[in-house]
Image (cartoon, rainbow, N blue to C red):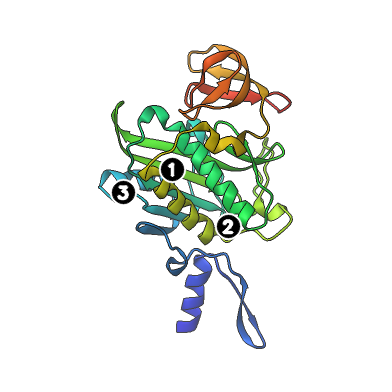
Amino acid sequence: MACRKRLGILADWGYSIVASRRGYELAKDDGLAPWDLDAPGPVHLHGELPSTMDEARTLAASGCPSGTLVLAMRQSAGRGKSGRAWASPAGGLYASVILRSALPPARAGTLVLETALILSDLMEASGLPRPGFRWPNDLVYGNAKAGGILVELGGSLDRADWYTVGVGLNMEPVRVPGRATSSLADLPGKPPRRARMAAGLAAGLARWARSPDTDPARWSALASGLPRTATAELWDGSKRTVTATGFDTRGGLACTDDLEGIATGESRKLTWQGEPS
């Protein structure tokens, strides 16, 4: 009975264990047990949450340290950009990292770029193809979305008390009606372990947040598909068609027709030429 209970706990943490003639064998080592999570701060692991971002916000407001990592095996109310629902079945990576940094809120968009860079590097290091980055917050293979990034903050216009960076990554196939999706399991090669991705993300972000480098050259690998034309629906209802050439020090799009570009948060919807609207 005790053995069965422990096996049940491991299954809840995402480890696939099967019985064989030799006993029990680990069929898939992609769990999120506490001993596998070598993060730079406290780790809060949950079987299910409405949203890791909501839990991270509560923890950040209570004073938890930078580098704190919040994980859930599944989410019942996961969300993406502009409050859109984010499908969060078991098997994906749903993580939020709490950061305390001198980074001003006006440059919060750089956190999205840095997160995309860290995740892309981790995927490449594991032998997978690097994903594309579709500004403002998507990781894609072709036109199919594999992951999304969300940044929130608490504080004032001149100083953030804390940032929370949320990631939803399709480790296994996820079907979303009306949207093209991809997953790391669809790619050639073996997907990296979720524990390694989560810990690597938290460590990389905590390190960068201590001394933020906002030189756009840092994220040049994310701009490999640019220059490219896009139509932006802006916050005031107006539309602009721009040719994006890269990123700026705020984490926004640098454009050929506007020295200021488009800042993160100014565009309610961005449609890249050649992709479905």
Density class for disc 3 (Cα within 10 Å; few <14, some 14-19, many ≥20) is: some
275 above or below 203? Answer: above
Q: Which mark is residue 59?
A: 3
Task: Give me the residue at 58% from left, 31% from top.
Answer: 135
Task: Give me the residue at 57% from left, 61% from top.
Answer: 193
Name the residue carrying label 1: 165
Determine if residue 215 is in view.
Answer: yes
Name the residue carrying label 2: 91
Quadrant location, the C terminus: top right
Whole-number angstrom distance, CA of label 3 to CA of label 1: 13 Å
Q: Nearer the viewer, mark 2 or mark 1?
A: 1
Q: Which mark is residue 28?
A: none
Whole-number angstrom distance, CA of label 2 to CA of label 1: 20 Å
Q: Position of residue 160 (x, y in %)?
A: 31, 34
Callout 2, which amino acid? Gly
Sequence-wise, the earlier of marks 2 and 3 is 3
Q: Position of residue 89 (x, y in %)?
A: 56, 52
Task: Give me the residue at 61% from left, 52% from top.
Answer: 123
Q: Specify whether 117 is left or right of 21.
A: left
Sequence-wise, the earlier of marks 3 and 1 is 3
Density class for disc 1 (Cα within 10 Å; few <14, some 14-19, many ≥20) is: many
Callout 1, which amino acid? Val
188 above or below 115? Answer: below
- Element type at marker 3? helix
230 above or below 29? Answer: above
- Element type at marker 2? loop
